[in-house]
Image (cartoon, helix red, strand yellow):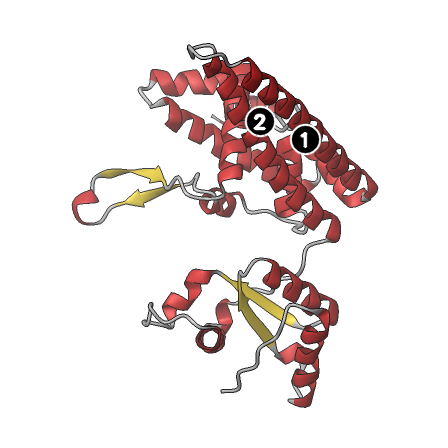
Amino acid sequence: MLHKEVKNTSASFAHIGEWLTDQEADPSQTMLVSEHTGRYGEHLLRWTTTEGWSHAVVKTTALDKVSFEHHRKTDQWDASQLAEYGDRFSDRLHLTEAPIPAVGQIKRLQAERRKMVDQRAALKSKLTEADFHDADMSQLTEMWNQQIQLLTQHIDQLEQTMNELIRQDPALSKRYQTMRTAPGIGPVTGRFWLSLFAEQDQLNARKISSRFGFAPHSRSSGSSVKSPNRSTGYGNSEMRRLMHQAARSVANHNPHYHDYYEQKLAEGKHELVAINNIINKLIRLYCAMWNNQAEYDPKHIQKMIKKYKKSA
């Protein structure tokens, strides 16, 4: 098997195209396979998308299916395992394309904003604790206040930049404005959904709930045969955080979801189970709005209740 190192430059990626051409590889019959490798993977994906080569990006855990040598880790070994995985599981490969530039920029700014928000929260926590110290904390509190003010300014600037990127793209702007009409979706959650799904016309609510650890799964093997279904709790931490906040918000402020929340508590459900149920309801609502490109209708729930009563 041929092994050749390719540097993270446009010129080096071009050599891949030249080599594939020399091998008489047909773009319609050829699939490049790589794993998530940070910036290198992003640049490679952008090159393959631009040049028209099919490219599948697989999880780093995918190689566990073709390799039992877990202690072996070299670029050459990984490349050979990726080639074997692509050959053996070709029917499971999914085409991956580089994100729209604006979406990629929003993703990066979103991640940086989250770091700044966490830093600001940590500083605010220090300010709260400063009152309980015997030592003179005036100098430190002044410094922390200055840092909080600076972080707040930077967060505002990042949000303005992201909003401008959305405004400049008609398709993104329409999606964003539509999703913002939904209960529980504020500017941060709206931008995050765009960054995740902007290039998908149709969303599957069940797959999204499962992907982000909200969908309940059965536990019915061995000693767990009588265990109740439960969600995994795994998934993108930011998505889980934002959807939890959205569910809390509608449970407090939206009459329909508030009644549902109180009903589940009255049935003896744990509050987190009730919140998780609301999250799944919201995901189904958001996906329906996304797929139909329709704004939220506040009267929709009442219409469905009346329809249900008539059919009963």
Which residue carries the number 2 mark?
120
Q: Amino acid at mark 1?
A: Ile
Please provide percent x and percent y for residue 45.
64, 64
Q: Do callouts 1 and 2 mark residues in contact (Cβ within 8 Å)?
A: yes
Gap in angstroms between the C-alphas marked 1 and 2:
10 Å
Residue at screen point 67% across, 50% down:
201
Which residue carries the number 1 mark?
155
Residue 5 shows up from this direction: yes
Q: On the rendered structure, is 285 left or right of 233?
A: right
Name above or below for residue 268 compared with residue 33.
Answer: above
Q: On the rendered structure, is 274 left or right of 293?
A: left
Residue 254 shows up from this direction: no
Residue at screen point 31% across, 39% down:
229
Q: Amino acid at mark 2?
A: Arg
Q: On the rendered structure, is 134 left or right of 27?
A: left
Residue placed most toward the observer, 120 or 227 = 120
Please provide percent x and percent y for residue 83.
49, 77
Q: Residues within 10 Å of mark 1 (few under 14, many from 20)?
A: many
Name above or below for residue 60 compared with residue 171.
Answer: below
- Report the number of numbered marks: 2
Please provide percent x and percent y for residue 305.
54, 23
Residue placed most toward the observer, 181 or 308 = 181
Which residue sits furthest left? Answer: 223
Residue 39 figure quarter: bottom right
Residue 26 figure quarter: bottom right
Residue at screen point 78% across, 45% down:
171
Please provide percent x and percent y for residue 155.
68, 31
**Mark 2 element type:** helix
Q: Residues within 10 Å of mark 2 (few under 14, many from 20)?
A: many
Q: On the rendered structure, is 49 left or right of 220?
A: right
* Mark 1 or mark 2, earlier in chain: 2
